[in-house]
Image (spheres, rainbow, N blue to C red):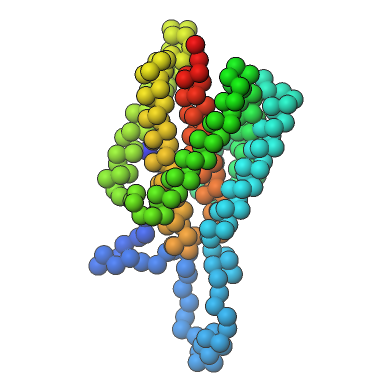
Amino acid sequence: MSNPVFSNSAVFGQPRQGRAGVQQRAPYAGSAATPAAGTLEQMYGAPTATPRDTGRLTYDDVIMKTAGLFAILLVTGGLTWVLAPELFFVGMIVGLGLGLVNAFKKQPSPPLIMAYAAAQGVFLGGLTHLFEGMWPGIAMQAVLATVATFAACLVLFRSGKVRVTPKFQRWLMISVGGYLVFSLVNLVLVWTGTMGGWGLREGPFGIIIGLVAVGLASAVLIMDFDSIKRGVEQGAPAKMAWSAAFGLMVTLVWLYVEFLRIFAILRGD
């Protein structure tokens, strides 16, 4: 199971194949009749159009949209930390709902995506405040671990040492699916009072599960990079930068929460 933001989008999917196995142009390139000779001369003499000029997705678009969403998350997170950390549960529920809506929308909705970032800020701001009160310094540890993991995944992807192949995708789908089932079972056991504390994630076994989750989130992050790369290469519309930024935020929030949990277990009684 890869990031549904990308896997459910034809824009970030695999290139289409022709009848002879020849890769076809992306559906966003368009087509036009052959222009006249005079028009051709003007076209050759004009400056080369950039992806931004043609309204297509660029890496700069993704970077700017991602930075904007995280700015919203940091502002709402900081306000929640200072004013109402007890609202973290509300942020979690609202963020989950908005996350599902945005993940399965065919076209991105910037207001809904920004609302998701704000809700996640409330959730993470309150949750981090709670953890920081019990284990001072844990927030900085989780932030640094998340940033370092993001950087490492980006370097590995850009270097070509880790490639997204069909086998890699199948392995990740099965692994993430199994982890989600385990997490749901553990959540039910804790919420029903059958088990206390972290439930099945106590002690050394909890650390192992946490490290597995970090590994899965890192693999999903690499798949996110690959999906964005395909979107840029296939000439996806510029507005899809919102979907790309949202997808990255979903994975990074998951990664940060897993690091918080690992450090909490390590530092707990």
Q: Is residue 66 left or right of residue 169?
A: right
- Give the image location of residue 155, x and y in percent: 43, 50
Q: Nearer the viewer, residue 160 or 108?
A: 160
Residue 201 drawn above or below residue 143 = above
- Give the image location of residue 162, x and y in percent: 34, 49
Q: Nearer the viewer, residue 91 or 127?
A: 127
Identify the residue shown where x is 42% and y is 26%.
210
- Give the image location of residue 152, x and y in percent: 44, 45
Quadrant (top left/top right/bottom left/bottom right) for the N terminus: top left
Residue 256 visible in rendering: yes
Farthest residue toward the left? 20
Farthest residue toward the top? 194
Q: Nearer the viewer, residue 252 or 119?
A: 252
Residue 92 picture quarter: top right
Identify the residue shown where x is 34% and y is 51%.
161
Residue 53 drawn above or below residue 151 = below
Identify the residue shown where x is 43% and y is 45%.
153
Residue 12 visible in rendering: no
Q: Is residue 27 left or right of residue 44?
A: left
Identify the residue shown where x is 47% and y is 69%.
30
Q: Exactly how many numbered labels are in the figure?
A: 0
- Give the image location of residue 124, x and y in percent: 60, 29
Residue 173 drawn above or below residue 191 = below
Farthest residue toward the right? 83
Residue 78 picture quarter: top right
Q: Nearer the viewer, residue 91 or 211?
A: 211
Q: Is residue 122 left or right of residue 269?
A: right
